[in-house]
Amino acid sequence: MAAPAAAKRPCWPPAAAAAAEPNKRHRTAAATPMDAAAGAEAERSLAHAQRRQQREHQQQHHHHHQLLLPGLPDHLAQLCLAPLPPRLLRAVCRPWRRLLYSPSFPPFLSLYAVLDDGADGRVSFAAYDAVAGRWDELPEPPMPSPPPRLWHPSFLSRRLPLQSVAAGGRLVLVAGSTQSLSPALPRPMVFDPSAPTPRWQLGPRFPFAPRRWCAAGSARGRVFVAGGVGAGYDANDARSGAVWDPASPAAAWEPLPPMRDCRFSRDAAEAVCSRGKVCMVSLRSRGAKEGAVFDLGAGRWEDMPPGMLAGWKGSAAAASAGGAETIFVVDEERGALIAYDWSGDRWRTVAESERLKGATEMAAGGGRVCVAAEGGVKVIVVDVTTPKPPRRAGGPAAAPRTWEVAAPAGKRVVALHVLPRMTRAE
C-alpha cells in the first residue's frame, strides 16, 4: 500500500506567517474592503440556504406526520371523522383525503363494472369513485390460457357472458367461455378492493367440472353457483351447485342438494337472495321461463311464487331497502324499475323512464340501483331510499332521484356490482 501523501500547504499563508517572513519573495497582499464584503455576502447566502433547507425538511416532516385532529391521537380522530360524509372528508384537507382511502378507515361504496373493450372480445375492469367523480382501472387479473372472451366470430349477435358475483365485499369471477366455447375458468378469481394492496387471487377449485351458462349470485356473503354446462352437456353437472365464502380463501366449496331438473343450463342466470331465499329464473326477458328458489335455512329447493315468476322480465338485483332485503327487476321493454313484495306476491313500480328501456345489467347497494343502459355506454342510477312524500295531499309520491354516469371512454358495461371503494395512496 502506498505511503500517504504529504499534507498540502495552504495556497495562501496566514497574515501572521506573511508578516514573519518580510524577505520572502512571494508576499500575501492585505485583504481589501471589497473582498471582505464579498466574503460576508457569501456567508449570508450560505446561511440563508441552510435555513431554507431546514424549513423545507420541517414542512415535509409535518406533512407526513400531521395529526388528523390537533390534540387527538389518530386512532381517536378516525372515530370522530368516520360519521362525516366522504365528500366532505375529501374536500377539507390532504390528510383527511388520504385517510378516506386508507385500509384502516371505513370504506364508502363504489360502482364496479366489467367492461367490453371492443377488441377481440377482450374484457377489462374498472371502479367508479362517486366521491372523486372518476373511473379507476382495476389490476389485470391472472386470466387462464385460453382466456374468456365476450364475443365469438360466429355469434356476433350474442355476447358470451362472463359471470361475476359481488360477495363478502369482493368481486368474484365464476364462469365464462373461451373462443372455442369451452368453460374458461377452472377456479374462481377474487378481487379484494379493501386489501392494503388490492389485487386478484385464485380461489379453490370448483367441486364440479368448470362450467358456463350457470346461475350465479351472492347468498349472505357467500358465492352461490348452480346449474350450467361444462365442455359437454352432462345432466349431473346441470343439476349440481355449491357455495363458497370468499372472505375465507382457504375454505372449500360446500355442495348444494341437486336441483330438481336441468333447466338452468341454457343461459347465464342471476341468483338473487332475499329473506334467506336464493331466487332465479331461466330467462330474464319476456317469454316462457322457469323459476327456482333455494331456501338457505331449510337447505332445499322450492317452487317460485307465481307472481314473482310472472313479473320477472329483466335483469335483477337484491339490496337492503327500507330495512329489508328487496329484489329489484328492470323491465327492459317497459322501461320500469320494479320491486317485489313477498307478502302480496306482486311487483310494485319504483321508477319508470324511457332511459331504462333496453337495460341489460344492474346492481344494487347503498340505497341505489344502478342499471346499464343504451348498450352499456352509460349507467342510470336510481335512488331507492325511503320515497319522498307526495307534493300535494292525496297525490302520487314524488319520482325517485335519477342521474347518469358515462362508461369509460371507448368501452361498454357488461356487468355491474356495488362494493367498497378501492384502497389507494391519495
Image (cartoon, rainbow, N blue to C red):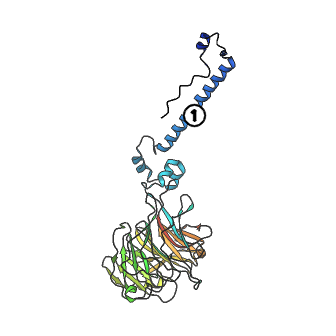
Count neighbours of disc 1 (C-alpha within 10 A) and say few if under 14, some if 14 to 19, many if 20 or more: few
Give the x, y percent position of residue 342: 40, 78
Judge by depth and name the residue closer to the eye, 95 or 272.
95
Percent position of residue 417, x then y: 48, 69
Vertical comparison of 266 with 38: above or below:
below
Q: Residue furthest left?
A: 298
Q: Is 138 in front, or is 374?
A: 138
Q: Position of residue 414 (x, y in %)?
A: 54, 74
Splitting the image into 4 quarters, where does residue 277 fall? bottom left
Q: Residue furthest front?
A: 2
Residue 69 occupies quadrant: top left
Q: Is residue 389 visible?
A: no
Q: Residue 409's image quarter? A: bottom right
Tell me: 411 left or right of 189.
right
Query: For the residue marked with disc 1, what is the amino acid?
Result: Arg
Question: Quick one: 324 or 165, which is closer to the camera?
Answer: 165
Q: Count of labels shown?
A: 1
| 66 over 9 or under it: above or below | below
Position of 41 compared to 231: left or right? Answer: right
What secondary structure is marked by label 1?
helix
Which residue bears the numbered disc 1?
52
| Residue 19 left/right relative to 348 | right
Q: Is residue 116 visible?
A: yes
Q: Residue at x 52, y 48 (%)?
A: 94
Is 335 placed above or below 100 here? below
Expressed as whole percent of the image width and height from the top left, the position of residue 139 reads 51, 64
